[in-house]
Image (cartoon, grey):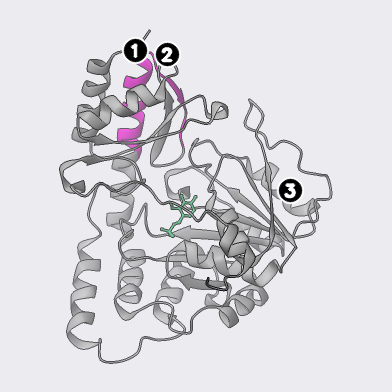
Amino acid sequence: MIALRQNIAEMAGYVPGFQPEDVASYIKLNTNENPYPPSPQVIEAIGTEVGEGLRRYPDAASRLAREEAGKLYGFDPSWIIMANGSDEVLNNLIRAFAGEGEEIAYIHPSYSYYGTLAEVQGAKVRTFGLTEAFEPEGIPERYDGKLLFLTNPNAPLGFTFSQNYIADLAGRISGMLVVDEAYVDFAEENSLELVRSYENVVVTRTFSKSYSLAGMRLGLAIARPEVIAALNKIRDHYNLDRLAQAAATAALHDQGYFLECVAKIKETRAWFTQRLLEIGYHVIPSSGNYVFATPPDRDGTRVYQGLYDRKILVRHFTDPKLRHGLRITIGTREEMERTVQALIEIGPGQ
Ligand code: PMP
């Protein structure tokens, strides 16, 4: 018998998106990756770093990447921390703010990994549901949990909370409000201004979606310098390797390429949404690089299987609150045309 901590022995652990062994033979629309490659400047910067840098440790402070992010977002680099995927900084926020037995909360449905990370810390996890109008249900007026995670845009549903709602929430809760903006580059609004006006607001971002760098593991957080200083005490001192730092700096720098990719995905999202509506699907208007769609017969499992048989991978949800819907990542226009064709073949069901 190994002497595990009780909470680790009891926890289920997080299961990331399904990856079949022959994954390359699928149209992969199940983990919200970007269908386009990273910027050519990123590839070049990584190549230079491979050639010249790898025998040396990376810059522990990820200075160049933070400066580039600071210029882009209009913050002093002391307000920014780079992370090995935004998952790393989500984890460190929990480690910094929620001790054993203390509470964190998030909205269900959203990114359940917050709960897994909290369980590791022995923190308590509370979830707040959503009304039909996509408003959180039951957050107490003076909620006093240590951290409240708001995924905005929401994943998997794709809607956004208004900035007024988020500001109101920040002003009335006593703990930290983490606005997880993993998908915000595909939306019309973000919460960066709230970081300046509310000391308890933290915004997290990832390079995995809009910057096509899921394989590199890169994220960042923007918050007041005292929050960033706390997170810096906790992280691995060399949390970003040299290749990741070079990639992050180049990706943020090449805004032309970035904006072009995001525009293409938004255009394809609009086209795909329209086609889904035409074939009778219920679709939630999305601000992410995915759409949440429910087949006419509400049998997401049937359609998931039909797509899988045709080598198209999507996510499906069996939670009745999620109307047995499918979360479908926006790929290239051609991939989405093939997906629509497959959905027509699969049919509306009974
Ligand atoms: N937040 C949300 C809402 C996500 O969907 C994801 C990715 N699945 C993450 C954070 C983690 O992103 P990263 O790849 O940067 O760790």
Residue under the image location 43 percent in, 64 percent down: 85
Task: Give whichever of 280, 252 is nearer the camera.
Answer: 280
Q: Residue furthest right?
A: 142
Q: Amino acid at mark 1?
A: Pro
Position of residue 125 in the picture relative to residue 327 (left or right): right
Q: Amino acid at mark 3?
A: Leu
Q: Which callout, 3 or 2, points at the residue further toward the start of the chain?
A: 3
Image height check: is 117 above or below 321?
Answer: below
Q: How far across and how far down the image is residue 178, in percent? A: 62, 57
Q: Is residue 277 magenta?
A: yes
- Residue 348 shows which numbered tag? 1
Foreground mark, 3 or 2, reads 2
Residue under the image location 40 percent in, 77 percent down: 240
Residue at the spot of label 2: 297
Main secondary structure of the magenta stretch: helix
Q: Quadrant of ligand 1?
A: bottom left
Q: Residues within 10 Å of mark 2 (few under 14, many from 20)?
A: some
- The answer to whether marks 2 and 1 mark residues whose Cβ atoms lie closer than 8 Å is yes
Residue under the image location 41 percent in, 14 percent down: 296
Q: CA distance from mark 2 to mark 1?
A: 6 Å
Position of residue 90 in the picture relative to residue 348 (left or right): right
